[in-house]
Amino acid sequence: MLAASISQIEYKDKWVRAIILPLMLSLQLYLDYSEDFWDWKLAYCIGADILTAILVWELIRTVVLLLDRYYPWQNGFLKRLLLQLLITVPVCLVLIIGITWTTYTFIVTPHDPNLWLYFYKIDLPVIVILLCMLNFIYVSLYFYRFHEQQSITLPSILTDLTEQKHVRKPKTETNRLMIKSGKKELILDMSEVAGAFVTDGICWVVTTEGKKLVVDCSLDYLEEALKTGNFFRANRQLILSRMLVKSIHSDTYGKIKVVLKEGSGVSGEIFVSRTKAAEFRKWIKVDIAFQG
């Protein structure tokens, strides 16, 4: 997602065109036109130059957008830059020379050799430089927008992922729990669930009958569904209900030792940390006599 959003940069280049295009046209008018009088031929030539500049800009922009889609900068900076220049510069030169030839042939005096000499010696080098400048403008715009979009998109993606982590819960219907076990979806009444635990990376649900069911989810995933007040997350490996607890004992450093009932599917002893001890005592209430 991030890679896709980064490669599809939106160029906000209206203000760039509004500034650069008039400057380019002014330079061209300064180099090409020194006449002090106006006639229809001069007006045509200036209009043709303006149209050519607009077409060239749009052509370069179109090529840049297509390359962003089919050959993005992530494929290699130098390769992409070279490919972009090899496409835009020759194609734009063909367009410019074609329009210039049409103008010189049908509008301006066709037998003046100085026109073409001036075009190739003065205009053409300037045009090539301007075409390269236009390309580098879009390169700069890309990486400016890349940095700007990354600084906005990445926190947004991380926020979305965090929200999805909290929102994504197992399916629950009133007092029922729906969990996936292999290719089956199990539907258990909450009263049938005694607890859940993880061992060797496998998550198990324990029923009140002592059955252990392998489920395709994490303990964190189950914890969200079992927040009914009847279950307690004792540690990273175990969620238990009161029916699993046989007795509890105070231990060193403020910890609590919990003895689990035999035959419940999760027998043995576990320890509740000092940070969770007060919460555990509140949860267990007076169901079991606290032994000091």
Image (tube, grey):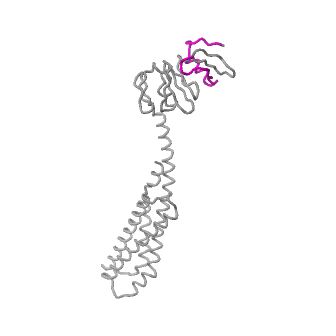
Residue at 49%, 40% (x, y): give it.
159
Q: Is residue 267 above or below residue 137?
A: above
Q: Is residue 104 above or below residue 22?
A: below
Closer to the camera in the image, 44 or 128: 128
Magenta-colored stretch includes residue 14 = no
Q: Residue placed farthest to the right in the image?
A: 252
Q: Quadrant of the C terminus?
A: top right
* Percent x, y of residue 63: 41, 64
* Percent x, y of residue 168: 45, 34
* Percent x, y of residue 213: 48, 26
* Percent x, y of residue 217: 49, 32
Residue at 55%, 12% (x, y): give it.
287
Residue at 48%, 58% (x, y): give it.
142
Closer to the camera in the image, 88 or 78: 78
Q: Is residue 274 above or below residue 80?
A: above
- Quarter of the view holding residue 269: top right
Q: How many marks?
A: 0
Q: Is residue 188 above or below residue 97?
A: above
- Quarter of the view holding residue 258: top right
- Side (left or right) of 44 relative to 6: left
Q: Which residues are magenta?
A: 262-291
Closer to the camera in the image, 26 or 63: 63
Magenta-colored stretch includes residue 289 = yes
